[in-house]
Structure formats: C-alpha cells, structure tokens
Amino acid sequence: MNITKRILFRATKEDKELQQSLKNVLGFTPDYLPYYITAITHRSFNEELEGNNERLEYLGDAFIGSITGEYLFKKYPTKDEGYLTEMRSKIVSRNSLNEIALRMGLQKIVRYNHHDKMLRRSQIFGNALEALVGAIYLDKGFEKTKKFILKYLIGTFVDIDELEHTDYNFKNKLYT
C-alpha cells in the first residue's frame, strides 16, 4: 500500500470494526479503508458524489463484466458469441449480483437510509457489491480483483451448471 495513503488515513475504533466486518465478507483485509467506506455508502446515506458508491459501482461493473467474459470465453471454447453473452448476462445481472451480495452478507454493512423500507427490497446490495469490486481494484490492483471475482464471486456463489439450464432472458423469448 502507498505510504501516503496510510499517513492520510487514521482508523478509529469504528473503522477497525468495519475493517473486520469487511474481512469477514470479502475474505481479506482491506488496506485503504476509505475506498471501502465509499463502496458501502448508498446515495440515500450520503448524496455527495465523492461520498457515495455510484462511481465505484461503475468501475466494479466494468471489471465484473470483463473478467466474467474472459472466464466464459476460456471455459466454453466451442460456444458461440450468443451463448457466451447470455451466460455473462445471467452472472452479472442486477438480480444475480443482488442475490450474491445478500448471500455474502453485505446487507449488514451497507450504509443506507434504513427508514426507506423500499431500499431493503431494491438492488442496492448488488450495486454495493459492484462498488466493492471497484474498491478492491483501487486498493489491491487488477490481479487481486480478478482473483476475487473468479475464486470468490464466481467460484463460491455462481452455479454455472444451473445457469446453463436456466432461462433468464425473457425478452428474447418474446421475439421467438
């Protein structure tokens, strides 16, 4: 970790507890906690652009999509582009990522307006998962991010065999 980052950030007791919670959820200890604090902070908790997870969500979404795409490309060398696209869509869909986030326990650490009951049933936890992937990239680099996605997200929470036999693309069914 960059020594400048370490000097600029002094962890409080609450931060240390959060760091432990993140370690329990992610499987490793974050180095630069402010990235992760931003990643778990929903706009309903902090509307300021630099204080919520929307930008990190964008970054994480890009990594999840591309690393999943590479994984599927290598796993299915004889499948066509349509099949690979559909499989990737199943893995990175809003519903899928939200389900993974809930199974990981992100709902326990995401900071959001708890008075808004609709948010509990929304996709904010999947969005926070994407933001966490963005935070991992900024904190740990590409290789750690790739390993996290492949071994932890896909390897632990995605059943590829089940996805192969599940039809999620209802829009395509309407056109056939």
Image (cartoon, rainbow, N blue to C red):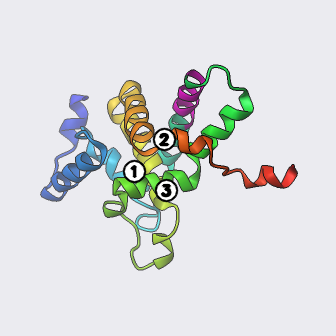
- Residue 132 marker: none
Distance from the alpha carbon under mark 3 to that under mark 1: 15 Å
Badge 1, how many Cα within 10 Å: few under 14, some, many 20+?
A: many
Relative depth, front residue between 4 and 148: 148
Residue beneath the point at 43% across and 56% down:
52
Q: Amino acid at mark 1?
A: Ala
Relative depth, front residue between 159 and 62: 159
Distance from the alpha carbon under mark 2 to that under mark 1: 10 Å
- Circle nearer the N terminus (3, 1): 1
Image-quadrant location for residue 75: top right
- Circle nearer the N terminus (2, 1): 1
Lateral position of residue 50 relative to residue 6, left or right:
right
The secondary structure type at the circle numbered 3 is helix
Lateral position of residue 4 relative to residue 91, left or right:
left
Q: Amino acid at mark 3?
A: Asn
Relative depth, front residue between 96 and 111: 96
The residue labelled by disc 1 is: 39
Badge 2, how many Cα within 10 Å: few under 14, some, many 20+?
A: many
Please say if the residues under marks 3 and 2 sit with CB atoms less than 8 Å apart: no
Quadrant including the N terminus = top left
**Residue 71 seen:** yes
Please say if the residues under marks 2 and 1 sit with CB atoms less than 8 Å apart: yes
Residue 146 x %, y %: 42, 29
Badge 3, how many Cα within 10 Å: few under 14, some, many 20+?
A: many
Residue 127 x %, y %: 49, 54
What secondary structure characterizes most of the magenta part? helix
Relative depth, front residue between 9 and 20: 20
The residue labelled by disc 2 is: 60
Foreground mark, 3 or 2, reads: 3
- Residue 98 marker: 3
**Residue 53 seen:** no
Residue beneath the point at 16% across and 49% down:
11
